[in-house]
Image (cartoon, helix red, strand yellow):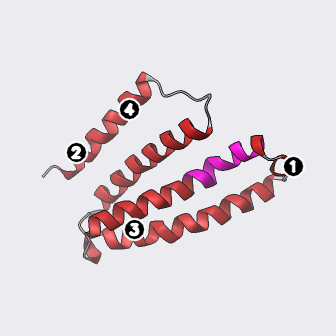
Amino acid sequence: MQSVYTILLLIVSNIFMTCAWYGHLKMKQQFSWFEHLPLFGVILFSWFLAFFEYCFQVPANRIGFRDNGGPFNLIQLKVIQEVITLVVFVAFSTIAFKGESFKWNHALAFVFLVAAVYLVFKK
């Protein structure tokens, strides 16, 4: 059950992270008030979202880490995190940025990342 909690927390964390890192690019297009924010205001907005990212990321790593009684070693946690990051980013960019396209080389890179997950769990 700890693996499920870890993965769910990582997914939520990555949603906040992706919104913090890339959401301001979309908001600038959609809201005139956001377009006029100075860079420091955009940074503060992103930090606000990043706070919630950490509220899910830190517990995910604590619950999932083997030395804390979880099922994953450090490398496994990191590789899982990276694959979740890519999946969330692809979903976000496809939904929020209609002009961005998912190409064959992106799909192949994703396959290699999934292969990395397989290899990191291989004994």
Give the CA separation, mark 2 to mark 3: 20 Å
- The kind of residue on which mark 3 rests is Ala
Q: Residue at x 84, y 53 (%)?
A: 37
Instruction: Name above or below for residue 101 compared with residue 47.
Output: above
Residue hosting label 4: 109
Image vertical order of residue 73 relative to residue 30, above or below: below
Residue 31 belongs to magenta span: no
* Element carrying mark 3: helix
Element marked by disc 2? helix
Q: Which residue is mark 3?
A: 60
- Left/right placement of residue 6 relative to residue 89 reads left
Q: Position of residue 26 (x, y in %)?
A: 69, 43
Name the amino acid type tagged 2. Answer: Tyr
* Kind of residue indicated by mark 1: His
Image mark for residue 36: 1
Residue mark closest to the camera, 4 vs 1: 1
Residue at mark 1 to residue at mark 3: CA–CA distance: 36 Å
Earlier sequence position, callout 2 versus callout 1: 1
Image quarter where the N terminus lies is: bottom left
Q: Which residues are magenta?
A: 18-28
Residue 109, located in which quarter of the rendered image? top left
Q: How many numbered markers are drawn?
A: 4
**Residue at x 56% of width, y 58% of height:** 16
